Amino acid sequence: MDERATRTDGGREEATAGDLGFELLLRYLGSHFGLDFKQYKPNYLKRRIGVRMRATGCGDYLQYRQYVRQHPEEYGRLINDLTINVTEFFRDPDVYEVLRSRVIPEIIDYKKKIGSYNLRAWSAGCATGEEPYSLSILFLEATAGRNTQTPWMLRITATDLDDKALKAAREGFYESVKLLPGIDLRRYFDQEGNGYRVKEEVKRPVRFLLLDLMHKPPLRHLDLILCRNVLIYFERKKQAKILDIFSRCLREGGFLVLGKSETIVGPEGSSFKPYRRKERIYVRT
């Protein structure tokens, strides 16, 4: 049925046509760009898409779908309107709770079993540093109570394309900090004026680099990669290339964590299997 079909029952026919156009638009965006819309409420999606439709002069969802086809750069603008560009410590606490209780202990147990005390992680799209510092804190918490003759060596590579964001990340100063329950703020942060500065113990393992995700970094045998809310900005082919890079960088049994609106589907995900579907955590096979 065409969205412009003749309306035989007033507003009800108009609503039905509009709903069909809306579904076709979401299906197109999902198949071509890989964005998972399940976490968004339909009314929220309609409001945010409506903003872009008005900005582009499109009168309905089908017209906007055609506009996105002809102007692929519009997808990036839509994503910016859909996603809340918030970066904070332990964003999505349920994900970090699984990292704390399941993933990191499993990594540490594996490393002890093979006699290696090197822990390696990559925060891809690290922005202003909250993510890699959160990861550093979790690893420090996990290794603090494990007595070994050999000290643990932690290295977290944090990359982004925004050099200004990386500069702020290296500074490690934040106006507010929200931690997971049970983590002592005073252990990992010094209060300065109206904010908090990350302590050297947390900063030392983290190396910040300017990097385009489309270029494979010199990283091998990683235990964990966090790339959250980044893949949604790329079309399918580029997503597949990035996932291939992640696969080559991770060791077998290493973990990949994506954003909650992202998922691995199709042949490009053949190197990964779900570990926790809800939290978008995968294992390199």
Image (cartoon, grey):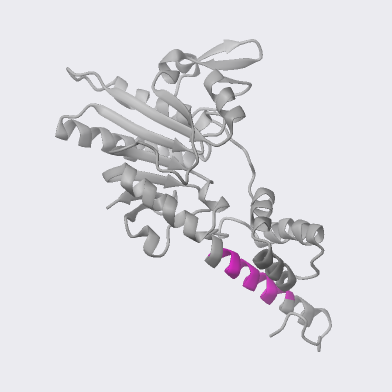
Q: Position of residue 178 (x, y in %)?
A: 55, 27
- What segment is highlighted magenta in the picture? 18-30
Q: Residue at x 54, y 25 (%)?
A: 169
Magenta includes 132? no
* The stretch drawn in magenta includes residue 27: yes
The residue positioned farthest toward the right in the image shown: 10
Residue furthest out toward the front: 215
Along the horizontal axis of the image, is 247 left or right of 190? left
- For the point 78% across and 79% down, the residue is 14
For this rendering, which residue is in front, 249 or 41? 249
Quarter of the figure with the N terminus: bottom right
Answer left or right for 101 relative to 84.
left
- Depth check: 119 or 44 in front? 119
Count every numbered label the image shows and give the total. 0
Predominant SS along the magenta part: helix
Q: Does residue 192 appear in the picture of this structure?
A: yes
Residue at 69%, 52% in the rendered image: 77
Q: Position of residue 154 (x, y in %)?
A: 33, 25
